Amino acid sequence: MKVFFNLALEPEPRDRYALKWAVPMLVVALLGLAWLAVSAFSGLRRLHQVQRSLAQVRTSEAALRSKEVRLQQEINRPEYKALIEKTEFVNQLIGQRQFSLTELTFKVSKLLPPNARLSGLALASSSETHPEVQFAVMGKDEEAIETFLDHLERSGDFNDVIIKSQGFRGGSGGEPQEVALVCTARYVAEIPPRGN
């Protein structure tokens, strides 16, 4: 005689409940997995875009460095170096500006009598405190030149007047003869502080 044993257990309500929720949980898990895959894919795509942008930035940076090196080599050429030194010197002089040439011309013009004119003005030598200025003056007669020299010597803005040359100009071809004077004087007017 054969004896059969039934070893199967009768399902409990808890087992039926778990089986009922297994399918929806599997669907939720698959949806979560799909969302993670899409997120990972879009993250990788953004990463590749950032890497391309970074490569472009590095390429343009390398091009700029190369250009900088070329420009630096050009600047270091002797002719440009001399120009840069002169420019820096001029900029330094401008930064140390001691007086305005316009102001100086105005002061000298006030010293001229009506029958004399200023034909040239130059900085003969520059010292830190009192630069030496050279004047070229043309007058209709010697009296005009003497009046200018007298005004120049009595002016509080100038001293140490030295006559470099004096002579006559013109007088040929119907031109009136004029007296020419070249002299120097030290500009001793009070120089305004820098930045004024």
Image: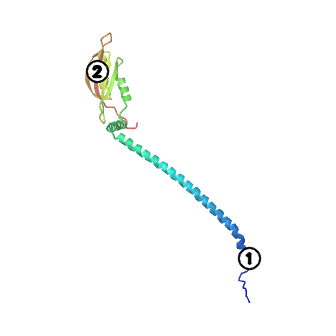
Relative depth, front residue between 159 and 76: 76
| Callout 2–callout 1 Cβ contact below 8 Å | no
Q: What kind of residue is marked 1?
A: Pro
For the view shown, which residue lies furthest in the top direction?
A: 174
Image: 110 above or below 26? above
Residue drawn at 51 percent across, 51 percent down: 52
Q: Alpha-carbon neighbours of circle 1 within 10 Å: few (<14), some, or many (≥20)?
A: few
For the N terminus, the quadrant is bottom right
For the view shown, which residue lies furthest in the bottom direction?
A: 1
Residue drawn at 41 percent across, 45 percent down: 66
Relative depth, front residue between 81 and 111: 81
Relative depth, front residue between 193 and 79: 79
Q: What kind of residue is marked 2?
A: Leu
Residue 111: image quadrant is top left
Q: Secondary structure at mark 2?
A: strand
Q: Is residue 89 left or right of residue 52?
A: left
Residue 137: image quadrant is top left
* Image location of residue 171, percent across then percent down: 30, 12
Q: Secondary structure at mark 1?
A: helix
For the C terminus, the quadrant is top left
* Image location of residue 143, percent across then percent down: 30, 16
Residue drawn at 64 percent across, 63 percent down: 32
Question: Which mark's residue is nearer the viewer, 2 or 1?
Answer: 1
* Image location of residue 65, percent across then percent down: 41, 46
Distance (Cα) linking label 2 and label 1: 128 Å
* Image location of residue 38, percent across then percent down: 61, 58
Image: 79 above or below 64? above
Tag on residue 181? 2
Q: Mark 1 = which residue?
A: 13
